[in-house]
Amino acid sequence: MSGEDARKIFAVETVSRRVFATFNYEEVKLPTIEEAALFLRTIGESSDIVEKQMYVFKDKGERTVALRPEGTAGAVRSYIQHNMAATGGITKLFYCGSMFRYERPQEGRYREFYQIGCEYFGNHDAVCDAEIIVVARKILSDCGVKNPKILINSIGCKECRPRYAKSVGEYASSIKENLCDDCRRRIGRNPLRILDCKTDSANLSGFPLSENYICSGCKERFERVKQILAAQNIAFTVEPKLARGLDYYTGTVFEITSEKLGAQDTVAAGGRYDNLVEDLGGKPTPACGFALGVERVVLASDGLPQVCAKKIFVAVAENTFTDIALNLAMELREKNLTVEGPLPGRSLKSQMNIANKLGFGTVIIFADEEFKNKEAIIKDMSTGSQTTVKIEKIKDII
Ligand code: HAM
């Protein structure tokens, strides 16, 4: 990854951290490697991620481990292991880091990619589902992703989801000959996955809709999620066949897409997973979360915000000005500015060229005439304008 690519990832991360902080989420660091069984139990044995995409291997202790394909399983494990429920009330976590999925790489789909995600534990109210969507939407808009499309659905809870899955399976059986090999296998194992199949997306029109199968509790909650989003002026589309490719979801699920992207157009996705904490050995705890693909956010953005500190280059016309220029550079660093130079031994012209090439917006020039009056020039590289200032005053002006 080039410096420029890393800077873009840093920009998305900086925006996300700020937004998470405003919603009171706390950062957690999750292990890159976990026992493979954790992902089998959470994402689901018959999911594409587990069946085809996980990097699984034996470590030197003959344990079967996997490079994490996503963050939710690790976050839930960490929530239980560190007894975060003990604080009572709610726990809100976020994480940033590389995820690994063995896929055929193409634009927006990589084998190692960077995800930023969050998980909200302990709140079963629709306010929580809506907050997750609002947070994702806010990060995307602050990252310059224009007109993202929010697709939402409810796939039902422990009680009603199996009813919906059964009906999807029955319908799939009836049109079996039109489905791909993978979906034929899914009929008996995990029918809802058929709704997420990219190969069969053209064959989905006659499939049952979740709204006709979910229970009244799920319906009520989903209505409330929609009301809260509407009241916050968040535009969304109900997509009644949105099911998501991971098994742990219950109730609200969502995806956010960008028309700027090609085939891989989902920039962020998530939903509620009320059974997962209990399934992994914790107390029954409602939970909800999402993750965004940072590379996809970069691709979908019309312009990432400038998040790096102001960059100042200090240039000297004479080697004898070096010490005083170095002192100024250190004073500016105390103000958390990014400072480069001076580069004595190179001509002033060459130093200016370097500053320009490295994208420094401001250059402070210790030039001969001005130096005699204890002054230096501040040059704005974008406009070319120059002002002459007393050297002792520069640190207060910049
Ligand atoms: P996911 O839909 O598997 O959900 O991934 C979330 C996002 O990660 C996708 O929308 C996409 O932007 C990005 N992504 C996935 N695979 C790739 C890839 N191969 N290359 C580039 N970007 C990719 C999850 O991972 C869930 N853990 C989200 C969640 C959190 N649900 C609840 N909490």
Image (cartoon, rainbow, N blue to C red):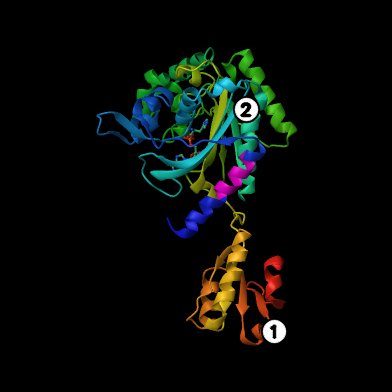
Q: Amino acid at mark 2?
A: Asp
Q: Quadrant of the C terminus?
A: bottom right
How many numbered marks are there? 2
Q: Residues within 10 Å of mark 2 (few under 14, many from 20)?
A: many
> In the figure, 29 relative to 108: above or below?
above
Q: Is residue 334 visible?
A: yes
Q: Is residue 333 left or right of residue 178?
A: right
Q: Amino acid at mark 1?
A: Asn
Which residue is the site of mark 2? 129
x, y percent for residue 216: 63, 13
Q: Residue at x 38, y 46 (%)?
A: 105
Q: Secondary structure at mark 2?
A: helix
Q: Which residues are magenta?
A: 12-20
Measure the C-alpha gap from mark 1 to mark 2. 64 Å
Please say whether residue 359 is one of the residues in the magenta stretch. Answer: no
Q: Secondary structure at mark 1?
A: loop
**Residue 258, image quadrant:** top right
Which residue is the site of mark 1? 373
x, y percent for residue 206: 51, 25
Q: Residues within 10 Å of mark 1 (few under 14, many from 20)?
A: few
Q: Closest to the observer: 257 or 82?
A: 82
